[in-house]
Image: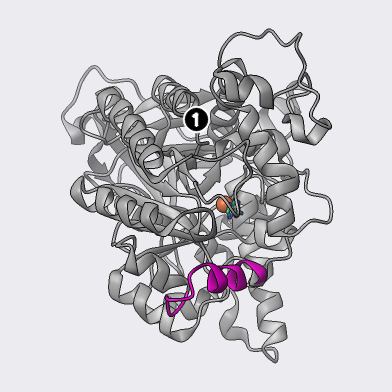
Amino acid sequence: FLGRFISAPGPNDLLIREGAVLVSSTNGHGRIEKTSWTVRSSDEALRLFNVGNVSVIHSPMNGFFFPGFIDTHIHAPQYPNAGIFGKSTLLDWLTTYTFPLEASIGDEGPAAESAVVANGMPAEATNGQPNKKRKVEPLSRAKTVYDKVISRTLSYGTTTASYFATISVPATNVLADLAHTKGQRAYIGRVCMDHPETCPDFYRDETPEQTIGSAIESIEHIQNLDPKGNLLAPIVTPRFAPSCQAESLARLGQLAQDRNLRVQTHISENTGEVELVKTLFPDRRSYADVYDHAGLLTDRTILAHAIHLSDNEISTIVERKSKVSHCPASNSALGSGFCPVRKLLDAGIDVSLGTDVSGGYSVSMLESVRQACLVSRQLGYVNGGEKKWNIGVTEGLWLATVGGAKCVGMEGRLGGFEEGMFWDVQEIKLDDIDSAEQGVGCRGPVDIFGWENWEERVDKWVWNGDDRNVKRVWVGGRLVHERR
Ligand code: GUN
Ligand code: FE
């Protein structure tokens, strides 16, 4: 790979380099073997790297290679609801929009049969009138939705995603199979929820045994697909404290510890949710303590949202080295609040970005970067205009790449162009000057006039770019998306 390479190795460090990078072509495991930031031509690069017969890929004249985005929190089954949330906030959003959709992406067993009607909504949502005529291929909805969400996230440059699936093991396995086939790096969690008072009858596990048994079933399916777990790995996924019985949380914590697995869940997203946790777990000191007591706060745990944490909870999370996924678009859409990202970073917590589709309305990580910047300014405003809260473009890009790598345990292996790192990369092209001059092709959403420096071009890309700017995407050296 030859040309311009841009990355954000630090919160205030936008690295713009020209040179060449040699990538081993082992499909899906391709890493950067050598780099040179002095060469300018392919002949020079081939001589320096001492290689003959390799294919050379040039960055676009008005573009660059950028590390793939790492979405550390996204609900794959909720993709059909992206943008559909009305005026709801978290708890009524879950019951109105989310549980019905997730339940419809289930297996073909009798529960799903009676729960799902023609328009895909559970029977309860349509006055209990199950549609007897429903005859669809088993798991067809899972296949359609999961195929689309993986293709779409790849097209926006998301090379790694940490997915919540649903409670259905067969459907979760479909998500894993598709991610593996399509080549996205993915952590996939079968969602565990079994609390009879907070989860609807049509969408919950019956017992802790069932929750744990189903979790193990999907973990083993995923580990069979990719025994080394570099491209695909299971992640233990209790939905959030209110949806799980204490026994289930404890057993999931034990499971994660026994098998050394990643964990993901939600924490302190909404004030009503925080109150609910207090009433459901009166013996625990705090929301974070519910997870800590269950052994779920590890250095491989990703906590989404983390908005309304007390200083004590922050200290606990620091001690446990657990990670945070900041989901700014979702937090604004559901009116959840402002995540104090600066405070979490200053406390020493690794923070990354998540789209949280469909609490978040967009699968685009560029949108998450933008929203992280915007929300940080609102937070500064409500804190008396303090500038320290501000997240700039470079810091946003750092959170979306290096921050993500830290949170998924891939620090030093993802998020940059250093030797030994995986080639998980998006090729960004700004306005399509060549084809526009020829009167063909589609101009992208970012107009470059020619006098902007590269830092300014990156700013313009972040604020106005979209999937039209993503020309090609690789994961582990494998081409997984190409815009035609
Ligand atoms: N809390 C529990 N479940 C969910 C979910 O699906 N999305 C969000 N944003 N928060 C949750
Ligand atoms: Fe979420």
Image coords of residue 368 (percent x, y): 61, 55
Image coords of residue 136 (percent x, y): 65, 9
Q: Residue at x 68, y 66 (%)?
A: 336
Q: Answer left or right for 336 relative to 185.
A: right
Task: Please name whichever residue, 481 or 66, is drawn nearer the observer in this view of the structure.
Answer: 481
Image coords of residue 6 (percent x, y): 45, 51
Residue 484 in sight: no
- SS majority, magenta: helix
Mark 1 residue element: loop
Residue 200 in sight: yes
Q: Furthest residue to the bottom?
A: 384
As shown in the figure, which amino acid type bears the numbered disc 1?
A: Ser
Q: Quadrant of the C terminus?
A: top right
**In the figure, 282 relative to 29: above or below?**
below
The image quarter in which residue 55 lies: top left
Q: Residue at x 48, y 31 (%)?
A: 473
The image quarter in which residue 337 lies: bottom right
Q: Answer left or right for 313 relative to 116.
A: left
Instruction: Check disc 1 and report the residue beneath it.
Output: 168
**In the figure, 94 relative to 295: above or below?**
above
The image quarter in which residue 435 lies: top right
**In the figure, 455 relative to 136: above or below?**
below
| Mark 1 vs ligand 1: CB below 8 Å | no
Q: Which residues fall within the magenta stretch?
A: 272-286
